Image (cartoon, rainbow, N blue to C red):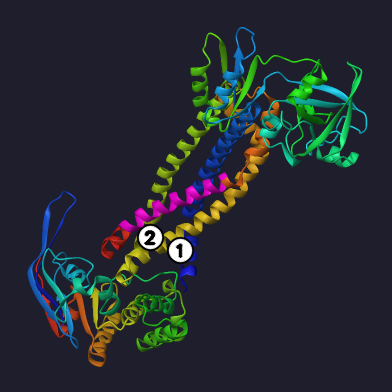
Amino acid sequence: MLSMINVSYSYKTKSKVDVEVLNKKSMEFEQGKFYTIYGASGCGKTTCLSLLGGLDSPRDGVISLDGVDIKEIGYNNLRKNHVSYVFQDFHLFSYMTAVENVMLAINISGKIKNKKDAKEKAVALLESLGLVDAEMNRVITKLSGGQQQRVAIARALATDANYILADEPTGNLDKENTQNIIDIFKQLVLEQNKCVIAATHSESLKKQCDVCFSLEA
Amino acid sequence: MGLFKRIVTEITRRPFRTIILAIAILVLSVLSMIGGFLQNAVNMAYQEYVKLEGYSIVVESRSGETIPSELIDQILALDHVVGYNDIGGHELDYKPVNFMNIPYKSNSYTSVSTSEYITLYGNISTSLYSTFRNGNMILKDGVFPSSHEKGVIIDSILAAKNGLDIGKEIELYSDTEDKTITFEIIGIYETLQAPEIRIDNSQGAYYTISPKSYIFCDYDSFFELRDSVDPLRSLMVYVDEYENIEIVYNEIREIAPEEEYGLINCLESTLSEYGAVVVALEGTSSGLLKFTYITSLVILFLMTLLWMRDHYYEAGIYIALGTEKIKIVLYFITEILIIALTTLAISLVIGRGVIYTYGEKILDIATGFTNSKFSDGLIQIKVLDNAFSYQSILSACGIYLLIVVISTLLSSVAIANYNPRQLFDAD
């Protein structure tokens, strides 16, 4: 279980004004469930994901994984082995192919050293997300938005992380692709016991999740 | 995609910025090589002037009286004093009787004049004579002539061509005194750099290889030949290292009263008369180097910051994927090193070409800035021949590499601590 316990977070603006984003928030995320953190822009959704993924530290409170503070686990270790990100803008390497992007994540995790095995795994992941051979070997810029987001999800799965943190994963997608991505998330939750946590202001995502945490600005 | 391929792809994706960074490194490193060349020229010139005077101090009797042996003994007992010679050049030309003169040769000259005469040199300490002190001649076999070892030492080629060796005798004839003298050969020396003599004529002064081989004998024998004794009115006292000249000068001054004896620091005197350009050039070259290195540090630091700015997105992805900060830093350093090493390899070739082709012009421009010139053309030639040094060029490249690495290290460490969101937003 990934937990956020009494977490408060604030940041300073350019004019040195303190802006409080989260105030004593607590949330728990279990494997095998699809969560959304819902709210308008500026309410702290992305901040929650940053804190859960160890990219930022809370002012107060604790983020823990299975009862262990993530500070003790180590942030790099956390992102290599336990949590993965899926971004709204995909944030893939545009000059690499789909396979190469996924292999990069495998390479960084250090779980598979052999290049051939890493490629096999990458191909398998992309196939499971509906990409065909020709698409896998295309440079990212030659893929559609929906395809790119699948590649991003495949990259997130490459490290065998149990917790997928998705920041506005359907923000740049059309209706059809949005539903495709939601279906993929549900499949991951059901079949692979993953925990998907999506920060979103999308109603359709909110309606189709298992648990929704609402935040207010 | 492997790490190296990834890095090369990142570099080639931004050709404009890569080229700008490379040009900056190239220009600045070539400038520093030129600065290094000038510094080498200064050191070479300085060494040539040191060689001219052989780290010596002249002690001269103001009254013209013979310098007492007690004073000489006191001077010899000082630390750092290695010996002395009579300052007067005791040399005479003799005609060889049972052998032939063989002139010296040098790689720098295509034609060598010759003479049937040899030059006999008489020294108190032959080993301290300038050609031996400077390493231009080295004793190969036997011993140096002295008051305890009477005889002569001859050049090895002279010996070989005439079938002479240690223990054999040579006969010399003096035209002026109309007599023949015999010497036993007690040593053979090898000439590494042929002695040069200055010729003054109506066309101006110039240097040439001595056409007469030098034969060195002990001091007493030289004057016995002439049935005369020159009183010792001025000494050339030799010091072990030129850094100790000042110390010895002051110590001699304490034991040789100023009103009775004149002292000259030969190195200082030579530099002030002929080597002012060296002193001035030293200031110019070190100024150029300092300016270049400081400017380079600032320029390259700013340029690598700009370079790193382009890598925010990339760094954001690596951080989000869980890459350790040290690996991110090493990745960026590797990228910059590839550019820097390639550029520095090119700058080595360019720098070498510039210095080789335009070395004299660069030296003229530099001395022009100092409002002085090399008064001795031969020293300028020697300086130009030897001032190019791969070592100094490689040092300049090494320093640049360090500057580039430090700049990249500072900026990439900063980036590695960012939240990927900040990096994506900034990009």
How busy is the neighbourhood of tag 2: few (under 14 within 10 Å), some, or many (20 plus)?
some
Residue located at (52% from left, 22% from top)? B249
Cα separation, mark 1 vs mark 2, equals 9 Å
Q: Is residue A179 left or right of residue A201?
A: right
Examine the structure image and report whether residue B84 is included in the region drawn in magenta. Answer: no
Q: Nearer the viewer, residue B175 or A121?
A: B175
Q: Which residue is mark 2?
A: B311
Q: Which residue is mark 1?
A: B10
**Which quarter of the figure is the N terminus of chain A placed in?**
bottom left
Query: Where residue B1 sits: x, y (%)?
Result: 47, 74
Query: Where residue B298 sits: x, y (%)?
Result: 40, 43
Q: Is residue A120 above or below residue B33?
A: below
Question: Toward which corner of the image does residue B318 lie, by quadrant?
Answer: bottom left
- Residue A42 visible from this viewpoint: yes
Label 2's element?
A: loop
Query: Where residue B53 sits: x, y (%)?
Result: 63, 26
What's the amino acid at mark 1? Glu
Q: Is residue B167 left or right of residue A138?
A: right
Count of numbered badges drawn on the protein: 2
* Labels 1 & 2 near each other (Cβ < 8 A): yes
- Dot 1 or dot 2: first in sequence order is 1
- From which residue to which does the magenta span run? B392-414
Residue located at (41% from left, 54% from top)? B307
Q: Nearer the viewer, residue B423 or B126?
A: B126
